[in-house]
Image: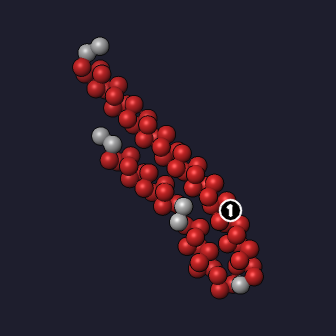
């Protein structure tokens, strides 16, 4: 195998690994939001003043996906 083909193959594998990482991060964020979202809705049903805290706790897992997307842009 020529060096050019090996470099293209390695670059493609790095991009595929980054894509798998983002997919797993998104799956984990969705799984975390499932429990957080239901608890936040229950807390807001009892006390409407909990809206801000519930929204903040629901948004926190999404930062995992944002960080994973940043990693994709760092992969050469």
The chosen color scheme is secondary structure
Where in the figure is residue 66, as x and y percent of width and height?
45, 57
* Residue 31 found in image quarter: bottom right
**Is 8 left, or right, of 20 in this rendering?**
left
Furthest residue in direction left, as rendered: 3
* Residue 9 found in image quarter: top left
Where in the figure is residue 16, as x and y percent of width and height?
44, 35
Q: Identify the residue at horizontal 30%, vertical 22% (top origin).
A: 6
**Is 5 left, or right, of 32 in this rendering?**
left
Q: Identify the residue at horizontal 32%, vertical 47% (top origin).
A: 74
User: Which quadrant: the N terminus?
Assistant: top left
Q: Is residue 56 above or below residue 6?
A: below
The residue indicated by pointer 1 is 35
User: Which quadrant: the C terminus?
Assistant: top left
Q: Is residue 9 above or below residue 1?
A: below
**Is 25 left, or right, of 50 in this rendering?**
left
Q: Identify the residue at horizontal 38%, vertical 49% (top origin).
A: 71
């Amino acid at each position: 195998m020529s060096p050019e083909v090996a470099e293209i193959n390695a670059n493609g594998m790095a991009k595929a690994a980054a894509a798998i990482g983002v997919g797993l991060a998104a799956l984990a964020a969705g799984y975390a939001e499932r429990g957080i979202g239901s608890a936040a809705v229950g807390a807001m049903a009892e006390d409407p003043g909990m809206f801000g805290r519930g929204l903040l706790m629901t948004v926190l897992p999404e930062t995992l996906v944002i960080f994973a997307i940043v990693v994709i842009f760092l992969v050469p």
